[in-house]
Image (cartoon, rainbow, N blue to C red):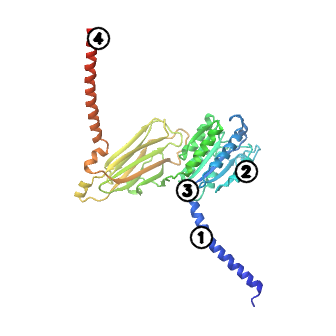
Amino acid sequence: MITRKRLAAGAGALLAALTAGLALPSTALADETTAGQPKVNLVLDVSGSMRARDIDGKSRMAAAKQAFNEVLDATPEDVQLGIRTLGANYPGDDRKQGCRDTAQLYPVGPLDRTEAKAAVATLAPTGWTPIGPALLKAADDLEGGTGSKRIVLISDGEDTCAPLDPCEVAREIAAKGIGLTIDTLGLVPNTKMRRQLSCIAEATGGTYTSVEHTDELTDRVNQLVDRAADPVVTPVVTQGGSECAKAPTLESGLYSDRAEFGEQRWYRVDVRPGQELRASVSVAADRAVDPDHGVLLRAVTVQGREIVRGEAAGNGRTDVMSTGLRYPKQAAEDEAEGSSTETVCLQLTSSFSPAPGVKTTPGLPVELTLDVVDGPGEADDVAAFGLGRGWWLLGVLVVAGFLAGLVWGWLSRWRIAVWRTN
């Protein structure tokens, strides 16, 4: 016998099921909408040194709070933002406990400005400076989604929790190939802190900025948050082979890799008759290296014959070495010979060597750009490389200079003759 109580329970279950069924599509749609949104994690140093009153007559902590409030007001609606602290909670002298002092103040997600500001208002300078552990946790905060990911680290001192070197942490994050960029800002920096924060930023392709005024801090953080909202091309992670036969075949696009010191990396690209291969490569010295180094990029056939090369050398004044090459595969001759698609082997070699005591793993960051386009016609082959039109321009300039010299010489002799007569 069906009682009224059972009937009511059944109706309630049916209503709940219908409601859940209706809610699922909207929830899935919301997840799809937010999956591609950019994510930014602001990581703030709240260690004891932030009490110093040397930024526009107020403490570093007060300047950071003011800047954060203005940044929160200006954050674009489509940016998911979070705030993580380091050194905010433990005031004691226990190093082990102090180096675990990092916490998520506001979770990465849709921004509630009022709630985020209330959380920032509670901060007070407290303890240690565990930059390395904070970066590891901050990277975890940004997991998931397909949009750009950026950490903005604001600190007034170097890490106090070695041997977990924050530079090594940044390199490990970059080696994961998750497209995460770390930008660093140093408040009233010294040389040691500047060197460490620069190293962290360079390891992930980020930027370092020195800050000594509140408005500078506000403007720079705003720029970085806005930059996260800009469309970006994320490099595709690849792994070059030890020889051409074992190399991956790549299409037009942007790729990232890691190359050990002294190691050759090989990649393959297919080029059809009438197309042109344009390739460029950059190798970044994300750690201390010896001066006098270079990068060589060679295009060779599968039989090993060199087609063209690009090379660059440096003396240690820059952290990135880049070079490129172009290879147009002629259409007319190849078609006459019945030739088809050609496999071009790209060989990357760099002569970086680590400074004494520097770790050699992971390898140096490599960024490879490939573009296979329709090549120029036969009549434009020379001009396409800037030679044909360049020689015409050079000829015009030579003739114009010669005529100008004749006129100037004639005028000078005439003026001298007139002066002597008078």
Alpha carbon distance from label 4 to label 1: 96 Å
**Could you tell which of marks 4 and 2 lies nearer the N-terminus?**
2
Comparing labels 4 and 2, the label whose residue is closer to the camera: 4
Residue 181 versus residue 158 in the image, above or below? below
- First of labels 4, 1 by sequence position: 1
Q: Earlier in the sequence, mark 1 or mark 3?
A: 1
Quarter that holds the C terminus: top left
The quadrant the N terminus occupies is: bottom right
Within the image, what quadrant is residue 221 found in?
top right
Q: Nearer the viewer, mark 3 or mark 2?
A: 2
Marks 3/4: CA–CA distance? 77 Å
Q: Are marks 3 and 2 in contact (CB under 8 Å)?
A: no
Q: Provide residue 349's location: percent of width, then percent of height.
A: 42, 45
Which is more toward the observer, 2 or 245? Answer: 2
Gap between marks 1 and 3 measured at Cα: 22 Å
Q: Which residue is mark 3?
A: 147
- Judged from the image, the secondary structure of the residue bearing numbered disc 4 is helix
Task: Say what secondary structure mark 2 lies in.
Answer: helix
Which of the labelled discs sits on residue 25, or is there none? 1
Residue assigned mark 4: 419
Image position of 405 (left or right of 265): left
Residue kind at label 4, given as amino acid type: Trp
User: Which amino acid lies under the numbered mark 1 shown in the image of this protein?
Assistant: Pro
Estimate the x, y position of residue 103 in percent, counting from the top left.
Answer: 70, 51
Q: How crowded is the residue under tag 3: few (<14 C-alpha within 10 Å), some, or many (20+)?
A: many
Q: Secondary structure at mark 3?
A: loop
| Residue 130 visible somewhere in the drawing | no
Question: Horizontal placement of 55 versus 420: left or right?
Answer: right
